[in-house]
């Protein structure tokens, strides 16, 4: 049995390890990071568009009601298991105009990483209005009220899905067969507040259009709109 002193030391070391593994608190003004993330999201989206193995993604993007782009999903190591990353959501109105961006955090126990892969890009297509409505809440668990499937690669290009979400992942040309069932997707209130200058929910951003996006955000919206065949249907009010 450990003595009192040894027990205290073990507790202190464990606490230090937990604190080291946890992300550091961020200032409220997260605008520089948010801006950078939008640029990364556009680059990730272009990577997916240029990938010839993602034929289903290319041919069904025009049917999507929303696109959640996670430029970097990192598999956790010491202390904490699972994976996580920050995402950027743009969504299409009934009129066809694309709106956003809204910021989210993705947390999951497994993102289908292949052996040795620690970082991956993920793009999730919201194929139904039900999927978009799920994302408008403060947080939800994929696979619960809204079903999610791993997107096909190569020979699965002609597959059809009934699920609300279809998810794709890439990592240096490899495909992890991404499985996001059970993942928690949470609105990143801190980044949304820092980016737009006041507290805004995804509903405020994507439906009420309370703020005009920045130039980089407009570029992302244009890239998605053009790829989805909805040219010029993006922007502010």
Image (cartoon, rainbow, N blue to C red):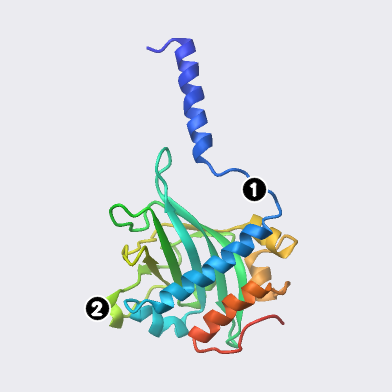
Q: Position of residue 163 (x, y in %)?
A: 39, 73
Q: Which residue is mark 2?
A: 155
Q: Residue furthest left?
A: 155
Q: Position of residue 82 (x, y in %)?
A: 40, 49
Q: Position of residue 154 (x, y in %)?
A: 27, 77
Residue 219 placement, left or right of 183 = right
Q: Nearer the viewer, residue 104 or 215?
A: 215
Q: Compared with residue 19, is residue 55 higher up or lower down, i.e. above or below?
A: below
The quadrant the N terminus occupies is top left
Q: Which residue is mark 1?
A: 26
Q: Compared with residue 231, is residue 127 higher up or lower down, i.e. above or below?
A: above
Q: Compared with residue 118, is residue 104 higher up or lower down, i.e. above or below?
A: below
Residue 237 placement, left or right of 140 = right
Q: Position of residue 75 (x, y in %)?
A: 40, 51
Sequence-wise, the earlier of marks 1 and 2 is 1
Q: Residue furthest right?
A: 198
At numbered mark 2, what does the secondary structure look like: helix, strand or loop?
helix
**Taking the image as drawn, is residue 134 in sight?**
no
In the picture, the disc for residue 5 is none
The quadrant the C terminus occupies is bottom right
Q: Residue at x 63, y 64 (%)?
A: 35
At numbered mark 1, what does the secondary structure look like: helix, strand or loop?
loop
Asked where in the image residue 124 lies, by quadrant, the reply is bottom left
Residue 18 placement, left or right of 53 = right
**Taking the image as drawn, is residue 163 in sight?**
yes
Asked where in the image residue 137 lies, by quadrant, the reply is bottom right
């Amino acid at each position: 049995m450990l003595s009192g002193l040894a027990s205290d030391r073990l507790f202190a070391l464990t606490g230090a390890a937990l604190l080291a593994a946890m992300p550091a608190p961020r200032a409220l003004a997260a605008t520089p990071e948010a801006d950078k993330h939008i640029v990364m999201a556009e680059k990730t989206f272009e990577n997916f568009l240029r990938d010839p193995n993602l034929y289903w993604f290319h041919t069904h993007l025009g049917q999507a009601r929303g696109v959640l782009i996670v430029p970097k999903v990192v598999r956790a190591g010491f202390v904490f298991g699972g994976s996580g990353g920050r995402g950027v959501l743009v969504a299409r109105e009934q009129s066809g105009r694309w709106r956003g961006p809204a910021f989210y955090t993705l947390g999951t126990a497994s993102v289908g990483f292949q052996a040795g892969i620690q970082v991956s890009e993920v793009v999730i297509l919201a194929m139904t209005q039900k999927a978009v409505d799920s994302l408008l809440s403060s947080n939800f668990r994929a696979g619960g009220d809204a079903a999610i499937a791993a997107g096909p690669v190569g020979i699965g290009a002609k597959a059809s899905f009934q699920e609300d979400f279809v998810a794709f992942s890439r990592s240096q040309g490899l495909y992890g067969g991404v499985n996001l069932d059970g993942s928690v997707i949470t609105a990143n209130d801190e980044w949304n507040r820092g980016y737009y200058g006041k507290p805004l929910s995804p509903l405020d951003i994507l439906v009420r259009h309370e703020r005009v996006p920045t130039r980089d955000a407009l570029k992302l919206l244009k890239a998605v709109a053009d790829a989805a065949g909805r040219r010029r249907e993006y922007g502010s009010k």
